[in-house]
Image (spheres, helix red, strand yellow):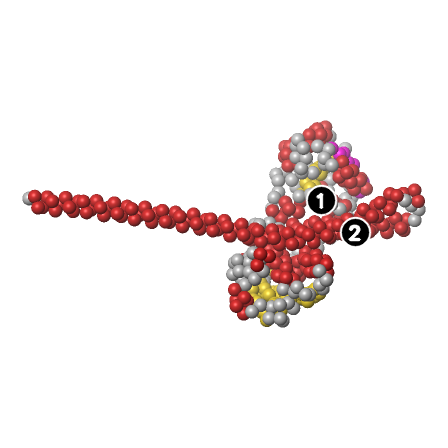
Amino acid sequence: GDEFGELARSFDRMTAALKESRGQVQQALSDRDRRLQEALAELRQTQQRAIEDERLRAMGQMASGIAHDCNNALAPILGFTELLLRRFDQLDDKAEIRSHLELIHTAAQDAANVIGRLSEFYGSRNDGERQEAIDLNAVVEQAIALTQPRWKDQALARGVTIAVHADLQPVPALTGSDAELREALTNLIFNAVDAMPTGGTLTLRTRAEDACVAVEVGDTGTGMPEEVRRRCLEPFFSTKGDRGTGLGLAIVHGIVQRHDGTLDIESALDVGTTMRLLLPITGARAEGRRPEAGRLARSLRVLVVDDEPRICELLTAYLASDGHRVEAATCGREALDKFRAGRFDAVLTDRGMPEMNGDHLATAIKELSPSTPVVLVTGFGDMMKAAGEWPDGIDAIVSKPFTLAALRHTLAQLAGPAPRGSAADV
């Protein structure tokens, strides 16, 4: 009996030891799995930070050129306004005055276009979810304009000439994200410029091929050996040393894949490189240009709100020139008091204001009069549209700097025919 008892106790001890060992193994596996999950999450965060750093690096490369272009655009504005102010008492030649004013107007438009390039380049980071009709030729032209300070101004400052040739054939519209494709082409142009340290020719081509559209970015630069060509799409692979992150082409490749396309690379040492994007056509139709709106046939009563007096004056002058009756307020609370005391067909408001911002003002106005259109006139307009940001109570967004045509179009869209008993009839 003792032998069987001892055997049973030994078996129990062995069973307990096995259970303990199994528990330890399970715990070890659980700990390892947790560490792997943490490492994977950290790796993903690091990869995302690296991608964002590459985007910021590309933006930084454009920023110095954009500052150069801004200064060039501001120079005639300051110069001609100074001349007009200094010679104000002697201004009798209307043709000369008109010429100066036209140059100032053109320079101001150029400055606005330059500032808009950064928001065009960066776009929204939710672009992968946006599906819109894309005119690829327009995107190529925008990418060329975006990068002009790099391939022209900065190159000439180094004594280097880079010629740019655009061979853009009529192509069908694509569906996807124009901001992402613009980013991809910008990266490819930057790479091409880097590959031509002593100058050369940058060529961009578009072609329709069966059910696809092809776009090529070619350079006459140093080219790549076969091993580099095979590896250049790998994340973090770079031949630029400290000047590169190795993510530019990886980002381009990812964008092309998200558009169900392919990226082919042809390169030869001392001959150059051609990057070829092949993107499928999905039957999208590009929108035509919006016709310029004429002035409304009726006079509106408009409430204008901006904490910057010069903007209020400009909006008032624009609207009054079209026959509208305007009241101005320099803060949200003043505007709300005026709205309660009067009747208005539309409200144009800035967004960033002290005490009550434009978003809160719009909400308050809609509570009082849900049918009154509220237009947000803001310097953040392009960024808000790119990010899909649309505050409650806002019927339209007009970006600063604005034009009379933009205001006319917005009011024509929102005001429409005069309803009975509208403020305009009072």
Q: Amino acid at mark 1?
A: Lys
Q: How many marks?
A: 2
Crowding at dot 1, Cα within 10 Å, few <14 / some 14-19 / many 20+, comes out as some
Q: Residue furthest left?
A: 1
Could you say which quadrant of the image residue 12 lies in? top left
Residue 374 appears anywhere in the view: no
Is any atom of residue 6 visible in this view? yes
Locate residue 202, reporting x and y percent: 67, 65
The residue beneath circle 2 is 106
Label 1 secondary element: loop
Task: Give 301 or 88, whichever is nearer the viewer.
Answer: 88
The image shows residue 97 at horizontal and vertical percentages of 88, 48
- Point out the stretch of residues depicted in magenta: 322-329
Separation (CA) of disc 2 from disc 1: 16 Å
Residue 411 placement: quadrant: top right
Looking at the image, is 218 positioned above or below residue 365? below
Left or right, residue 14 beside residue 40? left
Residue 220 lies left or right of residue 85; in this view the side is left
On the image, which quarter does residue 360 sit in?
top right
- Vertical placement of residue 375 versus 227, above or below: above
Q: Residue at x 60, y 71 (%)?
A: 269
Residue at 54% in and 70% down: 226
Of marks 2 and 1, which one's residue comes earlier in the chain?
2
Answer left or right for 182 relative to 327. left
Q: Amino acid at mark 2?
A: Thr
Which quadrant would the C terminus be assigned to in this image?
top right
- Dot 1 corresponds to which residue? 400
